[in-house]
Amino acid sequence: MPLKPAAMVFQLGEIWREQGLEVHVARDFHPSADLCILHHDRTFVSPADIPPAPAGVRVLNGAANDISKRRYSSLLVTPDSDWTGPVILKTNLNHFGAPERRDGKTVGGELRKKLATLSWRLARRLPPKDYPVLDGIGVVPDWVWRNEDLIVEKFLPERHEGLYCLRGWIFFGAESYGYRMFATHPLVKVKSIVSHEYLDQPPPEPILRKREEMGFDFGKFDYVVHDGQAILLDANKTPSLVRSARSERVMRLARGVQPFLK
């Protein structure tokens, strides 16, 4: 599948070309490459699916082969947990499981998807591009617990002046920038965002540590700070850049490739 223009790697590749670097996009790594970048929009990547790189050449994100939420979530609960607060239902797969679902659409699945927009409980699947927030463990449907593709987490939002907050951290190598979005919806959806701010300080240590543990060279982490605790909510190794592709922040990200080429 070709890179979409909104993909972060696509935008950075255009900048690198303008700066005189050769950039090749293909299913296999170029035999004379000085650096390889893996860009598989999948939650799980088998080592067998990674093309061989030239001898001695580094593959960025080559170690980030599992970004399932069970891999990094610190909020998981079970029917026997003693948690008494609200919970949120999510897919274990990245981005609502959409990348994997593109390869397996069925007529029945599409009908259930439409039904889920009206009643996700009746459809026995989560509503499209949404994660329901429930009052507690006791009201989670039994079929959710039995579905290995779903997880149940404590719902610990970050709040500010009555709004929900979500922090983002986009990074490439040693370069990065952060931001915080404010919204009226618990998931901080685009339509519910009312404002945002850029963050000058690096993310808290627990978030930095998660990046190292998961083998990320570049990507985007979403997190919240709840009662002083930094909590990773989403790890994305194929992020998009929806704002100016030549902003100072994006140009800073582009500089992150230089140390890998020395």
Image (cartoon, rainbow, N blue to C red):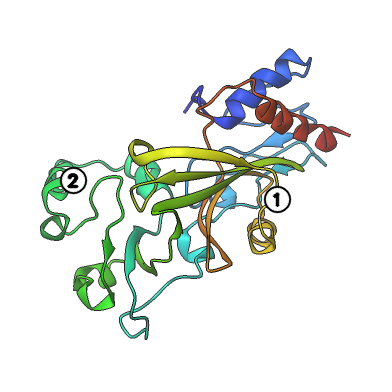
Q: Nearer the viewer, mark 2 or mark 1?
A: 1
Helix, strand or loop at mark 2: helix
* Residue 248 coordinates in the image, percent (x, y): 69, 26
The percent position of residue 162, horizontal first and vertical second, equals: 39, 54
Q: Is residue 138 left or right of residue 256?
A: left
**Callout 1: SS:** loop
Residue to which mark 2 is pinned: 113
Q: Position of residue 123 (x, y in %)?
A: 13, 55
Identify which residue is drawn at 60% across, 24% down. Answer: 11
Residue 106 in sight = yes
Mark identifier at residue 202:
1
Of the pair 145 and 62, the residue shown nearer to us:
145
Instruction: Identify which residue is drawn at 23% across, 50% down.
Output: 127
Rendered image quadrant of residue 151 = bottom left
In this rendering, the answer to whether 170 lies above or below 209 is: above
Give me the C-alpha separation between circle 2 and circle 1.
Answer: 39 Å
Q: Residues within 10 Å of mark 1 (few under 14, many from 20)?
A: few
Residue 99 tag number:
none
Asked if the residues shown at circle 2 and circle 1 are in contact, with their CB atoms under 8 angstroms apart, the answer is no
Residue drawn at (20%, 73%) of the image: 139
Q: Amino acid at mark 1?
A: Pro
Vertical placement of residue 254 versus 130, above or below: above
Instruction: Tell me where residue 188 appears, x and y as whole percent.
Output: 39, 47
Q: Nearer the viewer, residue 219 or 55?
A: 219
Compared with 114, 223 (above or below) is: below
State the residue in front, 189 or 238: 189
